[in-house]
Amino acid sequence: MTESTLRRHSSTLRRRLSCRLSLFSLKSASSHNSDQERPKSRALIEGHDFPSGPPRAVREQVTKINDAAPRIVGDLADELDSSAIRKVMETAERRRDSERRKSIIQLGFRLAHLTGRQNAGQAWAESEKDQLIPESPTLTPDLSSPSPPLPELETPKIVEQRLSMARSRHSMQVPKPPPPEVGIRVGDFDVRLRKPYIYNPLQSNRVIRLLSVRRPSVDGIVGDFYYQLVTMSLDDPVPYETVSYCWGDSERKYRINLMDGSFLMVTQSLGSELAAISSHSKTGYLWIDQMCIDQANLAERAQQVKVMGDIFASGLRVLVSMSLPNSSLRSLFTLVDLALEYELNQKSVVDLQGALSDYMLSGGKTPRLLPPFWKAMVDLLRHPWFTRAWIFQECVLSRIVVFVFGERLVSLDPIVRLALATSRLETAIIPGIIPPGCVTTQPGFHQLYLIVQARSDRAWGKPQDFWQMLSNVAPYTHCTDPRDRLFAFLSLLEDDTVEVKPDYRVPRFEIWTDVAKKIIEGKSNLDLFSLCPRVGQEESLREGIPSWAPDWSKPEATIAFASWHRVSPFNACGGRQYGDAVHQDRRRTFRPLRLLQKQLRVKGKIIAAVQDAQLEPFTSLESWISRDLISFLRLDQALTHLASISRPTDAYPLSLERILKVILADGALLYDTPEFSKGVYLLDSELTDLASAYVQFHNPELVGSAPFQLAPYARNVYSLRNLSRVAVERRLVMCDYGRLGLVHQSVQKGDLIAILHGSRTPVVLQARADGRFEIKGQCYFEDSMHGECAYWDEDQADEFILV
């Protein structure tokens, strides 16, 4: 240690010792100005309490003590000063040695990482040898040399005044606490020297960044996690894992220290869980979108989205970060252990359902729910992670999905088995016993079902209806950028006829419009209309999205009559293609679809107009869920109203079977059942049986009971309830010549029924004052579903401009 450093330490010690001695002198009152200030013991010795004065012997003894007092007090003071200085110096040296050892160990970890060596002990030894932190000699102050004079003592009153002034100054400016830090630090200077990490451009489209994670240890001392961003090619990847988590608040409050001396700011949700995630890493390399992608670079974000599927497919597994209350975790782990035991013994979900009843239900005639286990499943399935847009492709494309619950890992399979078993147990309970937050209404249950279905389809090579899947999943997700409701799923798009390039510089309404155009061009049909209209269609129109383009942020309003990859005999256009001509080669030079200012030009004919739309729509979904078909269908009310407006010239007489056939869209939802037959969905005899079951069935509470199962109409009641789903959010209308139709609930009197080239079902158009049309979606219309009304030649079709 240099002389100046030693002088500085000595000065500091003198100031501290001076302060202590000043306080000691003020408290002991070694010099007194009056007799009243003398201590009582000294007053007794000096005879102040003797009325006639002290005896002679006492006075002589006091005189001797007074003569020896200066020498004794001086010796005691010298000994006190030397002892205090030595203790202070020894304490400071011990503290410095501890800090120095910790700094050397941390620097050894850092040196081991930077030099590529795994042996941190070797790096530590070499750092000592190279004198990266030189060893300092032990402080041995020279007590014999004269010390500088002590500073002038201050009275307690002055000290208190200065402290009061300092407190008042600091109260005016409260310093902002530093952000929480994650990662290694080497001394206090590390905070001042670190700078924000600067992303370098990626060398190619197939290069990604990975977060290197290391946690070395020396002599049983475990160091902090230290991180570093490295680049890697997807064509020759090292083993790595991907991380799936919730962004939460977009404000970046946590600081991640990197080994190159820089730092990254991340959101609180990631910063608080990064250490737990890192501890479960098998490979030492993690891919985290928030850190491995330059989020401020829109071009890089778009490019990385293109290879997102390869990133998750090439990873060893995906770690899903989950944080739940401790009380729910204990109950959840009990259920998970039970599910793992039944899975190990190759028992079915039905067997697991029976075992779960012992935990989640008590004995007795009326089941009584036990809150802890139900609450654990509800807390799990309503976790915000299930509403993220990106998790769908993360779980579908990854080889293995693992949930991280603190220190425990749980795979996807037992979670899915628990969700299915609890849902079956939930539906088996008497209605009214289930609490409001039941399992099947949580977003996680819906998401898990779709994820497992998509993973199964990919495993068996089954083609996926990407756009129908997107329509089912995207509206129920949340994302920071609304365009990610499409971009987050593009890695699952396997249709070569539709090419979508993510571009975060384009507004959302332009992206939706452009994608709809490419779908129609690539598919060479108008089946896209099956996804229109959406819930909140008026809001989408105000935002600039045309009526013929689905708004992927809004859920579907109805169940489609016909869609891609769906077996359907409907062929309302008689096989006519949209546009002037159609060729399967996508490299054709002509454009059958002309898009100008969000306009879509199509060809076809108007075949009818809506004359009556006064019947209430089938919007009582609660009645359908509760199996109250009488309140949901209201066939008696429909029959009475239509009979009152019918004319003698109408083509067909009214009957309960005829109305039921239109409401069920001729059994449109039988497309994947053995009862399906081309040309006619429901035979007349089947319609008669369904109408009879509707008349006989009056008590929905009996559904599932033994008497109901034995009833001859039980099977028809189940079929009627299943087939009537197609009528939800639709209404029954009467058109020209008394023909009936099933249309979207927004259709009004005066709207038009049209057959367009390329559409397998009729569509409803609403005329505008400027001669253009808005589309109101597909419809079912009597005597027009199989080409009966498509009587014109293709060159005789009219042209419609849709907006």
Image: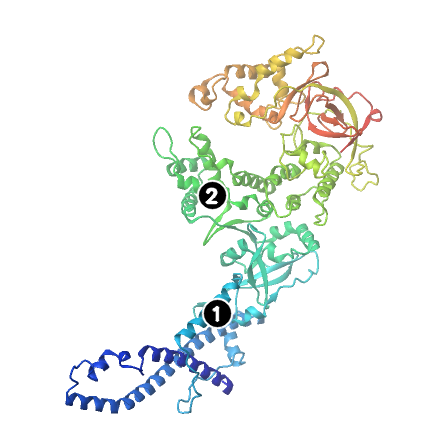
| x and y percentages locating residue 187 in the rendered image | 51, 72
Tag 1, which secondary structure?
Answer: helix
| Mark 2 element type | helix
Q: Amino acid at mark 1?
A: Ala
Can you say whether 531 is above or below 222 in the image? above
Within-10-Å neighbours for mark 2: few <14, some 14–19, many 20+: many
Viewer-closest of 575 and 636 = 636
> Does 157 sit left or right of 75 as displayed?
right
The residue at 81%/22% (across/down) is: 792
The image shows residue 180 at horizontal and vertical percentages of 52, 61
Q: Nearer the viewer, residue 240 or 653?
A: 653
Q: Nearer the viewer, residue 200 or 758?
A: 200
Residue wearing tag 2: 379
What is the crowding at mark 1: few (fewer than 14 residues within 10 Å), some, or many (at least 20)?
Answer: few
Where is the C terminus found, in terms of image quarters? top right
Q: Nearer the viewer, residue 726 or 632?
A: 632
Q: Quadrant of residue 599?
A: top right
Residue designated by label 1: 166
What amino acid does circle 2 point to?
Asp
